[in-house]
Every structure is written in structure tokens, then in C-alpha cells.
Amino acid sequence: MARNPSDLMHGTLDVLVLKTLSWQPMHGYAIMRWIERRTGGVLGFEDAALYKALHRLERSGAIEAEWGVSENNRRAKYYRLTEPGRRELAAEATSWRRYAAAVVAVLDGERRDVIDALEPGTA
Amino acid sequence: MSWIAQGVRGVRRAFRLERWMGEQVERELDDEFRFHLEMREGELRDAGWSPEAARAEARRRFGDTDEARRYCRALDHRGAREGRRREWARGWGQDLRSAVRQLRRAPTLALVAVLTLSLGIGATTAIFSVVHRLMLAPLPYPDADRIVAVSQTSAQNDVYIAASPELVDAWREGSSAFEHLGIYTEAQVVRTGSDDGRESLRAARLSAEVPAVLGIRPQLGRLFLAEEARPGAAPVAMLAYGYWQRAFGGRDDVIGEPVTLDGRVHTIVGVLPRDFVLPSFSPVRDRQVVLPLVPDSTIGYGFAIGRLREGVTTAVASAQLSAVMRSLAAQDPQFEHLSARVMRQEEFLGRGTRQMLLVFMGAVTVVLLIACANVAGLLLARAAARQRELAVRAALGAGRRRLVRQLLTESALLGVLGGVGGVGVAWLGLRAVMAMRPPSLDELEGMTLDPQVLLGAIALALVTSLVFGLAPAMLGAAEGLRASLVVGSRSATGHRRSQRLRAALVGGEVALSVVLLVCAGLLVRSVLAMHAVDVGFDPRNLYGAGITLPEVRYSTPESRPAVYAAIRERLETIPGVVAASVGGEVPPDNGVTFGKLEIDGMPDLPADAPSTIGYDQVSVDYFRVIGTPLLAGQLPSDTAGSPIVINETFARRFWPDGRAIGERLRLSENGAWRTVVGIVGDVRRPGSRSSANELRMHVPFDGTSPYGAILVRTSGDAPQLRASVERAVAGVDPDIELHELRTAEGVIATSIAGPRFSMTLLGVFAVVALVLATVGLYGVVSLAVTQRTREIGVRMALGASPRGVTAMVVRQAMLLAGGGLVAGLAASVGAVRAVRGMLYGVEPLDAPTFVVAAASLAVVAFVAALVPARRAARVDAMVALRAE
């Protein structure tokens, strides 16, 4: 089932985690499963990287943690999005979408569009 | 558990906290990772993997566990620490805000507490800064503890005599204890030829070794060379830092410039460092220019200082120098009965002054303790009233430590405010001390509050707030915690406990103030005794001054008596002068001589016969002028037959049957026998216990010495006397030096000045202590009455009369005060030993003083108890019974 994950840019994981937590508080394992399912398995990542991101985000104040009881009655560390985290999520999402759109535009663009862009006004 | 044990446990817990917190971070990380791995394992097992394979795969998918763990751990630790710090700061911020609020809610308590603390902290700061300046401030030189002063002394070491350069040379050659040994004198020189015109400068003359003794390096240029301190060398000078800045603009090129001092051109060779000070009984800080000491006949005596070799003690050095003195005495009789002593800087202060300062330190500490006790009592009372608020805090989750911390913050706030007020009190106190200071504290000239003192005051404030705040804080927290558990109760035990503590504090205050009262009372009696001393002469309108005849004009002894006679004639012509004499010091001062007393016909004198005896050269009419009676024999007018006149105490000591006239005595084995020809009344210096004061001998002044003295009595106030005397003396010869004109009353006042100062200061402390203790007593009694209103109502309803109630309150209050009084009297018995050396004419265990002190305290306590007692009597039984 495991496929080689695409390389992710630094920070991509952060914004994905923030978005995931914007739905509801979760523990680390649940976050990982959620992202795997949402991306249809296209994006997978090393668990260690996830936890590093989680702790990093906690330190910067975007998320906060609390120990609770999981669905199978085990002690687990739940993370929750904070208000500053929500704001950061909005900002990151916007800039990510712009970045993605730009990449797509280049990949999908017609040759004509490009020439137009380089030399405006030529026929 | 005792408070001390609790405190220790808290401190230990604080230190373990760090490590425990760290362990917690580790544990949480482990738990988190383990959870994840177990979930993954479970998922894989559900999908059909075997348990071992599932575990291995889960681990593989996780990635580098160790690296992740390290990364996260570092992050978490830092975050945890920051969080704790923020929490801690927020806690303190809350406590501070809460403390301010509490103070605003109880403004009278805050005001009283701050005033009390200001008084205590301010007085303590002032006294300790004086002591620091006088006793503790070290010399600013390398290895300054090896710098010592060396002095000739009488054999009994009770009189210090200045040394001469030749004597210092003998000491240096005859002993091995010193690395360097030198001598210096203070001097005045006149600078001419500068833009500032004619300037009189404060100078010092240093022998060549003095810079090495001190270990100074010049700020600029160089120090003197040994050759420059010899007769005939080209004159050189060094400038002091301050004078260099002021008069020479701090220029680097002053080296080599000429400066004209006392008419001779000196070359400036160097500038002294900024903190240059010459060690002395009263350190010399203010010199402007420094010259080499050239031994010649005009420089007779100076102050000898030395640097001991590493490891040599003053005792060893003193012994070596005493041996030198003994060998000198074998060749030169003037050194018989003289010894030498080496003293460290701490010993420079006279023993009397040191003791006085110690007594002041003790007294002001007592005052501070009483002030703390008062404020502690106030806080205890207030904590009882705040029980509900503390209970709420406890119920909201504040642990004991938090409550204590909060209460301590309130104490600290009071303490700091008290410290700020204390700085003002200290400043005022210092001004007062400086204004009243006796000559022994002259060195305090120009002293102000320096930053060190302010820092000390703040530190003192914080420490005292701990002292007075700890008990109320711990009690208050305990009460708050207990009350939070028991709903709606007003804990009677808590009140009782704090009331008992308050009563104990007040009892202690009373005891301490009794001690101060007794000591102050003893000093008052001493000063009164000094005032009551029969000085033995008439001190009114009596003036005297030393005179020196210029050597060049009167170089032979025969030329001098006529001059003195002429001076005396002129003095008698001054309007207002009723009598004048030449020769003899202003009484009750006198000169001193040393020797081993031998009396013809009394071979076995007691071993403790004094070797220091008062000595003076007086003219034949001296005793008439000063008003001392001749009791037997006659007054000699010339020196034929070596006649002496002794005072009554001297005569009675050795010839109790009164047959002193015609007896002979001498002061050394080789000295001349002197014959007693007259006995005069005693002249006494109040406050002095020296044998030089009690036993006096007088020889005739024959006018052959270039050093003499004049004595003048006027009929009334004579404001122009100084000018008239100057004119009279100048009329005989304008080059005759007339020294400072002093009055007999002035000399007497000076000798009492020190004890008067001590008495005043200790008296002030005693009164302040009494007032504070009374205020404390009033507070306790007043609160007790308020708390027992219901009980009083019951008593009155059962038939007690108002007077009976008053009596009951007063009786209980006096019992408390009485307990403190007894304890204080008992403590005083021991405490008076501290002031024993300062007493005069009164025994340490002087019954009247103790009685008066006890009585005054009892009266004051009675009045303080009466006010609330009267209030108790006015309680309306019905109102009281309904009130709860």
C-alpha cells in the first residue's frame, strides 16, 4: 500500500497540518491518516517529519496540545488550532494557492500566451 | 511541621523542579511516539501482518525515531522553560497588583507601617553608613592591611606622642619588621606668582619612603627621589589630583613647570593619583600639594607610617620597636619610660570612639527590630481580618506556597516603600549627626549619602520585610487554607494564635525599649556627673593661647624672659582684662610627662604607681589668675632648688598624713630630685579618667623657653579680645607667633562633647523605641477590646461595672507590659556591660536609673492601655450581645 511519496516542499506539511486541524482537534496519528485519505495516498510522509512539524507548530503557537483519551481508550496527545494558527493558515493557504496556480499556468499554458506575456502588443 | 523545615523543603523542591520538568518532557514524547507506533501496529495487524512484522514495519515507516526525538525534545524543553518563566512573571505581576490593591484598601495601616519602617530603616542606614565611613572603609592601596601607623607611647600605652624623623630612622635600622617605614607631616604653604594671586595651600611633607609604604603610582610624572629629600637638594613638588585639575587645568605638560611655594621655586615632578589619602587617626584626604620631607630643625615631629613585611604581625613589630626604644634610652634619658606601638588602621580610631560606634549600632538595630515587630503585629491583625479573602483564594486553587508568596509580596512592597522613606530619614539623620558631632567624629566632614548607602538601604528594606512579613504570611496562609475547608467559620484558634504572637512581640518590644532606656539613662547620669564635676578653678571669661618666639631674634635663653614680661604688661593694659599671666596651659588642659615615680624616703612604691603624670610650666601668678587656691606652702617664682607644686590629690595619695611639703621626688633614676614647696587645689577635666588628669605637678615658668603661653581673664564678654591680644603681642614684636585663642569653658565643653553626643543619640533611640513599643501595646490592647466586645457585653449584663471593666482591661495590659518590663530589666543587667566604658561617676548597675526607666515605661504603658480600656467601659451590653 505504501507508495513512494512525492517530495514535499518545506512548509507544505505545516499548512496541511493546520488545515487538517481546522476541522477538529486530532492526535498525531489521526492527522496522518486524514492527510493520506484526503490526498488519496498521493501525499504520504515520514511519521517523524509529521511529529517534528507538530512540535514546531506548537512552539510557534499556531497549535496547542492537550493530553486526552483516544477513541480506543488510550492516552493520546491531542492538538488544536489556535486563533493565531487560524490566521496563519489563511495566509499560508492563500499564498500556496497562488503558487500552485502559477505553476499550473506555466505547465498548461499555450505557446501564444507566453509570447504575449514576453512581448506585449505583437500579433 | 516547623516553619524552618517547611522552608527547607520548599527550597529543595524548587531545585528538583527543573530536573523533574525535564523528565516530564521526555516522558510525554515517549508516550506520544509510542501511541503512534501502537496505532500503526494495530492497523497492520488488522490487515493481516504478524505482530513482529507489524512492529518492524511501523518502526520503519516512522522514520528516524532518534533524530525526531532529539529535535522535538529540544523544542519542548525550550518551550517549557519559557512557559514557566512567563507563568512565574505573571504570578509576580499578579501578586504585585494584588498587593497594591490591598494597601489601598487599608491606607491607615499602610501609612503607619511605612512610617514606622522609614524610621527604623532610615536610622539604621544613617548609623551604619557613619560606621562604614569611620571603621570599615579601607585605604585604597594594594595590600592595605599591611599599612600600619607607628607611634611613640608612654610606658602604659595610654598617651601617643608624635615621632621625629631621626627616631623613625632609628626604628628602621633597628628592626626587621618593615618593608618600608616613613614619616609625614601636614603643612600650610603659600603659593605666589600664579594667576590666582596669593594662595594658601594645604600641603603634606612626605619622607622618601612614604610613597613606597602606601604603594602609590603617580598619575603623571614620577614620585620623589631619595636625593630630593636631603638638605640642599633642588626643591620639587607633586600636585594632588584635584588641585592639578582645578589650578592647572589637568594639563599633561605641567611636569617640569615651576611653582613658587613659600617664596622658593619648586619644580613639579608629578601628579598624585585621584584617591590619595594619608592614613592617620583622622585620615587626611584633602591635600593640594605634596613636598618631600627634608629633615631640619623646623620639622620636629610627624606621623609615622609603615608597611609590614608579609606575615609579620603588629605584636612582633611593636616588640621590636620597644626593644629599639630601650636601647635608645640607655644612651639618651629622654627615651626612658617611652615605648612604641604599631597599630593597624582599625585601631586608629580611639578605643572610646570605637566603643561608642558599636553601642550606636546595637541601639539602632534594637530600634529596627522594634519597628519590625510593630509592623509584623499590624500585618497579623490585618491577616485575621482578611481571612475570608484568603479562604476564597485557597478555594480557587492557590496552594500554601502561592498564598505565602502573595502575602510576602505585600510585605516586600511595604518594605520597599519604607526603604524609600528611610532614605529621606537617613539623609535628615546624617545632617543631624553632622551638626551635633563631637570632635572625635570630625572626619565625617562633608559626608553625604553615597550610592553604596542607598543600595544598602534597599537591601535592608527587603531583608526587614522578610523579617516582619514571614510570620504573618505563614500564619495568614494557614488560616486561609483552613477557613476554605470549613464553610462559614471564623476560626477562633487562628485569632488566638495570632493574638498570642502579637502579645509576645509587644512583650519583646517592651523589653528591648527598657534596655535602651536604662542605657540612655546611665549616659544621662554620666553627662550630668561630668557637668557637676568641680573643675577646681573659675572657668568664666578665661582665655589662653600658645606663643612662639622667633628663634632668630631670641636665640639665647637669657633674651627671652624680658619679652614675656613685656607681653604680660601689655596684656594687662587691654580694657576689660582683669588678670593676665604668662606660662601655663588653658585649664583644665595640661601637659604630660612620663617617668617612673620615685619618692625620697619611700622605697617601696606600689607597683601600679602611674608613669604618666600631668606636667606644666606655670608662672607664679597662674593659680591666682585661674582661681585655684593654694592649700599649703608657697608658690615658687624661680627654678632655684628645682621646686615643684603638686595638686591635692597627688599630695594625699602619697602623704596621707599631709606632710608633703619639703618632700622630694623624681621621675627617673638619673633625673634631678625635685622638692615639693606648695600644694594647690585639684583642677579636673570632666570626663577624663587618665592619671595625667588626677596627678599634676607644676614647675616654675622662667621664661627661658621659646615656647610659652598666655592666659587672660576678662571682666565680661570680650568679643574684640583676639584682636586686642594680637595687637598687644605684635606691639612687643610683630614676629611673635600667636596660636589659636581658646577659652576654658570651650575646653571643658570639648571634653564633654563626646559623651554628650552619645547621650543625645542614645536618648533619641530610647525615646523612639519607647514610642514604638507603646504604639504596639496600644494596638494589641485595642484589638483585644474590639474582639472581646461580646464578652464584655456579657460581663456588663451580668452586673460588672464600667470601672470594673476598665480595670480588667488595664490589668491585663499591664500584665503584658509588666512581663516585658521584667524581661527587659533582666536583659539590662547584662546589656549595661556594653556601655560600661562610657560611664562616668555612675555604676553600671545603678539602681535609680533602673527604677526611673521602669517607672517611665509603666506610666506610658498605663496611659496607652487606658484609652482602649475606657472604650471598653462604654460598651453597651445590648448592642454588643446583638452584634454577632
Image: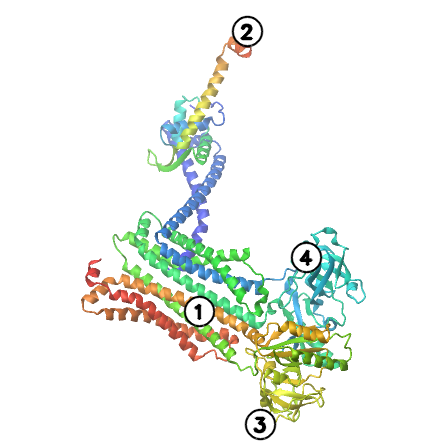
Same-subunit check for callouts 1 and 2: no
Res B158 seen here: no
Badge 3 vs badge 1, beta-carbon distance below 8 Å? no
Q: Disc 4: which chain?
A: B
Question: Along the line of sight, which residue is nearer the eye, B496 or B1?
Answer: B496
Callout in the foreground (1, 2): 1
Q: Secondary structure at mark 4?
A: helix
Q: Which residue is mark 2?
A: A122
Q: Secondary structure at mark 1?
A: helix
Are circles 1 and 2 on residues that touch, CB within 8 Å? Answer: no
Q: How many marks?
A: 4
Are labels 3 and 1 assigned to the same chain? yes
Disc 4 target residue: B243
Q: Nearer the viewer, residue A117 or B481?
A: A117
Question: Counting other residues with Cα less than 10 Å from the Cα at mark 1, is it few (<14), some (14-19), or many (20 or more)?
Answer: many
- Distance in Å between CA atoms under marks 1 and 2: 106 Å
Q: Secondary structure at mark 2?
A: loop
Q: What is the distance, in whole Å, between disc 4 and disc 1 at their CAs?
A: 45 Å
Mark with earlier residue (4, 1):
4
Residue sitting farthest toward the right: B232
Q: Which residue is mark 3?
A: B657
Q: Label 1 amino acid?
A: Ala
